[in-house]
Image (spheres, rainbow, N blue to C red):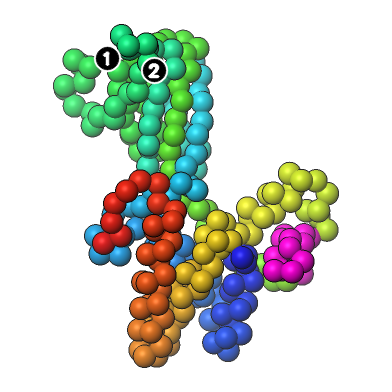
Amino acid sequence: MTTFSQLVDRIVDETRRPDLRNDICEYLNQTIRELHFTPNQGSAIAYRENLTELQLTANSEEAFTWAIPNPQTFQQMQAVRFDSLYSRSNVWVYAREVVPNRGMANLDVFYYRAGSTFVFSGYGGLNSTISLAYYEYPRRLKYRFSANRLASFDDELGWTYHDDWDATDELKLDARNLSSNWLLLRWADVVSEGLRAKIYKRLSDDSRARTCYSLYSQLRVGLFTSEVSTGGSLT
């Protein structure tokens, strides 16, 4: 387990390249995002930890719209349930996603995406509820020097917090979320090897870069099989 800033410090010390701190921060965020795609095909990977659930209340009779709260981290919609509608077998109705076209005139229940907005149709009218399940990427994290760190983690002592973020459980949770994510907390070894591979490639140390990338490729298989939301292959 580690935080973004602590891992950056460790790699800076290991490589003895404090001049590359800003680049290492970029490479670390890049590695975290990279782990959300298969290495060969570039297909998006949906991890259970990234699933978000939300219930909306429609404020219009028809064509209710919902703006994605954080477009920069939105990955994909998983399911849309119109809670006010039931099928003949008395189960909830799940809407299907469509691409806007003239055929939509013949559809009653559907949704589509327009940029950073989703449009829902046939949900049941004003004040009907719509349940969403969607995946988000982890947010990009920022490096903070030790005196300004919101939260830090030690294997023996656990979490410690900056004085300004140590007052309530809510502030502590915010501090942890701004300092780390589930990949750094559970799969720091995988992330570290991916980061090292990029740094050594930058330094033209091809031998170390290949070794780190090979280990990174092996370790990410374990991450995939342990955390992936649905079946599939990492290739």
Measured as percent of width and height from the top left, residue 178 is found at 63, 55
30 part of magenta stretch: no
160 part of magenta stretch: yes
Q: Quadrant of the C terminus?
A: bottom left
- Placement of 193 over or under 14, stated as above or below: above
Mark yes or no: residue 165 visible.
yes
Question: Which residue position is annotated with label 1?
Answer: 108
Label 2 crowd bin: few (<14), some (14–19), many (20+), radius 10 Å = some
Q: Secondary structure at mark 2?
A: strand
Q: Nearer the viewer, residue 119 or 221?
A: 221
Q: Secondary structure at mark 1?
A: loop
Residue segment shown in magenta: 147-162
Measured as percent of width and height from the top left, residue 114 is found at 33, 34
Q: Amino acid at mark 2?
A: Trp
Disc number placed over residue 214 in the picture, else none: none
Residue ID at (58%, 61%): 185
Label 1 crowd bin: few (<14), some (14–19), many (20+), radius 10 Å = few
Question: Which residue position is annotated with label 2?
Answer: 92
Q: Amino acid at mark 1?
A: Asp
Mark yes or no: residue 136 visible.
no
Residue ID at (61%, 79%): 10
Of marks 2 and 1, which one's residue comes earlier in the chain?
2
Residue ID at (61%, 85%): 13
- Placement of 124 over or under 176, stated as above or below: above
- Placement of 199 over or under 79, stated as above or below: below
Measured as percent of width and height from the top left, residue 176 is found at 67, 55
